[in-house]
Image (tube, rainbow, N blue to C red):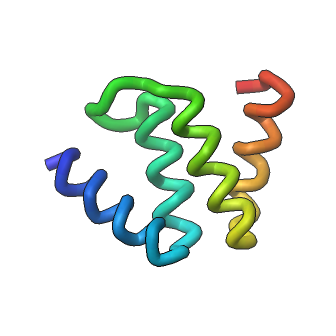
Amino acid sequence: MSRLLEEALEKGCELDHATSCRMLGDLYMGMGHIPKDEEKASEFFKQSCELYDHEGCVLYRAHLSDNW
C-alpha cells in the first residue's frame, strides 16, 4: 500500500502539486513504511515551499535550522 501511495505522490509532485510534495517529505521523515531519509524529505519540503505551500515552508525552514 505505501509503495502505491509513494508513487501517486511522486506523480503529483512531478505535476507541481504542492501538497503531494509535502506529503512525500512526510513519508521520508519516517511517517510511512519507507526508510527515513532526511535529505530527500528536505528536498520535497523545499519543492512544496517553492509551490507556495505554507506547511512545506515551515518544515523546510525547520530542516535548515536543524529543529526537526
Most distant residue in the front direction:
14
- In the rendered view, would you say 33 is above or below 50? above
Residue drawn at point x = 64 percent, y = 61 percent: 48
Residue drawn at point x = 52 percent, y = 74 percent: 17
Most distant residue in the left direction:
1
All told, the count of numbered labels is 0
The quarter of the picture where residue 62 lies is: top right
x, y percentage for residue 54? 75, 63
Residue 5 relative to residue 47: left or right: left
Residue drawn at point x = 79 percent, y = 22 percent: 66
x, y percentage for residue 46? 69, 51
x, y percentage for residue 32? 33, 37
Residue 51 relative to residue 6: left or right: right
Image quadrant in which the C terminus is located: top right
Residue 68 relative to residue 16: left or right: right
Residue 43 relative to residue 21: left or right: right
Residue drawn at point x = 50 percent, y = 43 percent: 26
x, y percentage for residue 31? 41, 35
Most distant residue in the right direction:
65
